[in-house]
Image (cartoon, coloured by chain):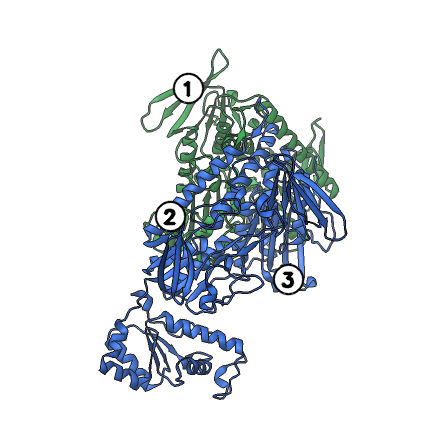
Amino acid sequence: NRRLGNVRGVCVPRSPPGRRARLSAPGTSRLSSAAREELRRRLLGLIEGHRVVIFSKSYCPHSARVKELFSSLGVDCNILELDQVNDGASVQEVLLEITNQRTVPNISVNKVHVGGCDRAFQAHQSGLLQKLLQEDPAYDYDLIVIGGGSGGLSCAQEAAALRGRVMVLDLVVPSPQGTSWGLGGTCVNVGCIAKKLMHEAALLGQALTDSGKFGWEYNQQVRHSWETMTRAIRKRIGSLNWSYQRAPRERAVAYVSSYGEFVEHHKIKATNGKGQETYYTAAKFVIATGERLRYLGIQGDKEYCITSDDLFSLPYCPGATLVVGASSVALECAGFLAGLGLEVTVMVRSQLLRGFDQEMAEKVASSMQQLGVRFLRKFVPVEQLEKGSPGKLKVVAKSTEGTEMIEGLYNTVLLAIGRDSCTKKIGLEKIGVTVNEKTGKIPVNDVEQSSVPYVYAVGDVVGGKPELTPVTVQAGRLLARRLFGGRLEKCDYINAPTVVLTPLEYGGYAEKAVEVYRKENLEVYHTLFWPLEWTVACRDSNTCYAKIICSKFDNGRVIGSLVLGPKAGEVTQGFAAAMKCGLTKQLLDDTIGIHPTCAQVFTTLEITKSSGLDITQQGR
Amino acid sequence: MHQAALLGGMIHDASHYGWKVAQPLHDWGKMAEAVQNHVKSLNWGHRVQLQDRKVKYLNFKASFVNPHVVCGVSKAGEETLLSADHIVIATGGRPRYPMHIEGALEYGITSDDIFWLKESPGKTLVVGASYVALECAGFLTGLGLDTTVMIRSVPLRAFDQQMASLVTEHMAVHGTRILRGCTPLRVERLSDGRLQVTWVDLASDKKDTGTFDTVLWAVGRVPETRGLNLEKAGVRTNPNTQKILVDAQEATSVPHIYAIGDVAEGRPELTPTAIMAGRLLAQRLCSRSSDLMDYDNVPTTVFTPLEYGCVGLSEEEAVARHGEERVEVYHAYYKPLEFVVPERDASQCYIKMVCLREPPQLVLGLHFLGPNAGEVTQGFALGIKCGASYQQVMRTVGIHPTCAEEVAKLRISKRSGLDPTVTGC
């Protein structure tokens, strides 16, 4: 059984420099209460997560005897040598709290505290130790994952591949408009995949326009059929759902289409679509329930408005649409709807694309305006939405700055004002998992562990992490490896490149650190550019934009690369890899461009933003 | 023109996404005019730029009189003698005509002509196996023309051969007729104005004929060195290739005469390399820097219908340099999301990363076959320039859903023998 691999010196955090706990006198703890709580959680995780755990010191003869005993029984142990970690003394303090024993060796078998050396040998003689060792967890599963999205499935499949007994619970609660979907979570069903396909449909509309300039002729007025598009997209997503359902089975993951809710420690109630309840137990749990879209909380919103959950499978063309919100989802939906030829208005309360580079965000918006999207800035819908003349909705909105009111008639109102974590109705309070009251997210430490040691969380349900599928997949996979594969690698949440699929695509990769640098320590190089395929198509020569942010110190290291233009995602991916390898401005200049591409513009950036020089391109 | 062909594919795709559009026809004349207008505006732009930077531009044909003096002849035949401290030769190359083939010069055209044709070339035979040959054949097919490529031995010789065969396989599946192991013997004009080409199959020695509207030679390029009177300056060339011999400083056998671009021996025939070599040379000549041009790890993209982007070593080169035991190749067959709805065939969408086997597994080369290959490859080329290891690339978070993210997810090594097909997303 590989997960009982002999792991030495693992899982215990090293104290920050200058706080070497071993320097502190016994009993006079210098650990902050938060740090103590954190350490306690980790130690409990260690004890509860392994069959045999021995806290030991490498030079201690008693510890050595105990290790020999287990070795003679052919049992793999997890041993933590307290003299070989920085905070051994703190560990001992916390062990005192947990086990009422400060000294080493300190032995736990199947979560039962056995005691020290003498007690272990007594237990061996009386047969208790063997009994404890035999008593494999009486749980139904080693791991139950709640939520079958990207994070949940990657974690479950990896855990099963490492021979854990794993169950996945996944049941989609229909949207207020009644939309529901299959396995795979938001990304597949109502997120990245569906969105990219609709974006692709809109781009093809643009391609049709361009194609005339390239000599293509078709004699008919081009129209778009919403039904044909959604049917094709549903077909694609259906096949993905199926492959997701098949994959767990191939990997021996038990997949149950039921809603999971904790009822007591280590026990969960699973309710299926028909309301039948079944109970399951597990040693560990992973919460990967993700988020669902938020509503306005005004009268008529759930009755009349739709969200992106509904849009991707809407059986009819939405017509004139009001998009409420300024998130990437809002702008992406507004963008492709406009690209499909619909009349689109976006209502924005304050900032566009919060959290993104604001210069880029404004450029995205202005390119959408050129496409005919109308923006209502600083307005929020305040009054009830009523059904107007057939198939029409009346929206009354109020300025956020004054008393001005505006009214509008739309066929569809699409809400994209953010998402709420699905942490409310899954019984977390019954087992004491801490949830951030404001955000509804589950705080976890750097190994995705919640306040309850055997409960972990991955994906959008976790606070303060980028909400991106590949990050979540990575986090889930690494979590499974730590839990079942004896690995230590943690998920690096800091550097995640991203793309926004607005009509003019935005791709960016910036170290979080950009915000901590002082402006005077940064040098920004930028340019507008004219993609070759846009020249013949007579599209604007001063829309696409590229910039890089360099640190003036650190050899001009590139800490951000941002692009607005076609295929921004494909362009950005490699730059992210290069920045991971320490890309500098000099190396960028030394690299030869691939001609003719958009990406090559980055290899010839000469104008700094601070110089104020003109960056416009000469069109025809 | 590649973009025009891609748009044809997109019009076809569009119907799957709900766009109601009739079967389109392609008007060559309209495209050619648009493309030519753009190219002319580029020509104009270059002249304006020279003026802006106070470079004197003379529309002369130049040849050496002695190592320091060049004679320029204007269109009207007037001669002007010019002298300079430094002279840079950047005359480039022109497509080669296979002069031993009867009718080649008379009836054939080259890539110099194809972009300026006012009328559609019609049914076309492309002779050659270079990237120019495959690119031209690819876009002609994409524009709906009956196109045949005749290849004597191997396609894309200097490139990774597995990738090269996937490129041609994709072309063959998508309607380009490929004649392997054949070489033309003669071209004749028939009474109806069409061209009859006779060729021989080198393996069986059997002869065959076909009729075409256009025969396009893409059998390589000849450097423009013959009219330069290089011997008067003492500049040495390679007698086989006619290219000018240069050192790492781009200097020829005469220290104050330099050669850059396609005319220089052993340099990749690529625009951005020529630009950078020129810029670096200028900086050295003005004592602004002593940086030399690094001709290693030059990324490039072949714009065949399925684009092929690459940087660094091919698998063959890596094995030759380091030995098979020391090379690890990670690879994947993947399906681009944009191929799914129109049910496009993705059998040739393939990525491979050639690495050293020993940790940290330095990346030696990357080969990407799929849509937007140039855009994908550029950033990874930077990574390789930064000395990227396989581990570092794997630790890069993917951008979902893109084709480029598949590069950061390459987990199957060739050595393992496991199925490299990516399933799911």
| Residue A454 spot, x, y in % from top left | 41, 67
**Residue at the spot 47% in from the left edge and 35% down from the top edge:** A231
Q: Is residue A107 above or below residue B298?
A: below
Give the chain of mark 1: B
Label located before the other in sequence (3 or 2): 2
The answer to whether one can see residue A498 in this image is yes
- In the picture, measured across the screen, residue A600 lies left or right of residue A286, that is right
Q: Residue at x 49, y 50 (%)?
A: A186
Query: Which chain does the blue colour mark?
Result: A
Q: Secondary structure at mark 1?
A: strand
Viewport quadrant of the C terminus of chain A: top right
Distance in Å between CA atoms under marks 1 and 2: 54 Å
- Mark 3–mark 2 distance (CA, rounded to whole Å): 42 Å
> Quick one: A141 or A260, which is closer to the camera?
A260
Q: Chain of mark 2?
A: A
Q: Which residue is mark 2?
A: A245
Q: Give the labeled residue for mark 1.
A: B210
Amino acid type of disc 2? Gln
Q: Which residue is mark 3?
A: A515
Q: Closer to the observer: label 1 or label 2?
A: 2
Task: Mark 3 vs mark 2: give the one in front.
Answer: 2
Disc 3 + disc 2, Cβ < 8 Å: no
Q: Colour of chain B?
A: green
Q: x, y (%) of residue B345? A: 42, 36
Neighbourhood count class around disc 1 (C-alpha, 10 Å): few under 14, some 14–19, many 20 upward = few
Under circle 3, the secondary element is helix
- Which class describes the residues within 10 Å of circle 2: few (<14), some (14-19), or many (20+)? some
Residue B387 visible to the viewer = no
